[in-house]
Image (cartoon, grey):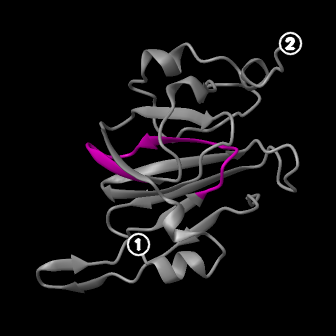
Amino acid sequence: MPEIDGAYLFEPTPHADQRGFFSRTFDRDVVASVGIDPDGFVQDSVSRSRKGVVRGMHLRGGAGEAKLVRCSHGAIFDVVVDLRPDSPTFRNIKTFELSGDTQVSVYIPAGCAHGFQSLTDPSDVSYRIDRAHDPEEDITISYKDPELDISWPLSVTMVSDRDERAPTLGEALKPTR
């Protein structure tokens, strides 16, 4: 499966016993060790989705938006698409399974589109974002775009109106004059 330049998978070590487990889900030193500024994150958000729900594909215009994403409960099929024209991995698609059992996080660089499908009912996804949200810069690409050809593992049960009406990749990124 192709890689995405600047995307990182952080795999913590859960400490389990008869009560359950404890896991450190963010460590500034680990994040800094790959060149990411841990103080650059400005917002944490969470979403809850039902099984089969797809959220995405989303990215931010302007300076973009980098995010650290993890599934804190349940499981998701996570998708990252590199849309940075100067990137050596431009247009590569990388998928991950993230789950509350592993607490694995994926770092998604600015300029990459992101989306996921909930594999469980429910799944909770946490996002640590490096810019305050500006709805004027939101870009949505169709989750069913034939050019992306994403093989969602489950039947898609629900998407937002915004995601359902989203343009194809070519239409979303067409230069405006």
Q: Tell me where residue 70 appears, x and y as whole percent.
A: 42, 58
Task: Identify the residue at image location x=61%, y=53%.
Answer: 95
Q: Tell me where residue 153 appears, x and y as whole percent.
A: 51, 42
Residue where numbered disc 2 is placed:
177
Number of labels in the image equals 2
Residue where numbered disc 1 is placed:
26
Task: Identify the residue at image location x=65%, y=54%.
Answer: 109
Q: Tell me where residue 33 appears, x and y as whole percent.
A: 61, 82
The secondary structure type at the circle numbered 2 is loop
Task: Identify the residue at image location x=33%, y=81%.
Answer: 14
Badge 1, how many Cα within 10 Å: few under 14, some, many 20+? some
31 and 142: which is toward the camera? 31
**Marks 2/1: CA–CA distance:** 42 Å
> What range is drawn magenta here?
108-127
Disc 2 and disc 1 in contact, CB within 8 angstroms: no
Residue 124 against residue 176 in the figure, above or below: below
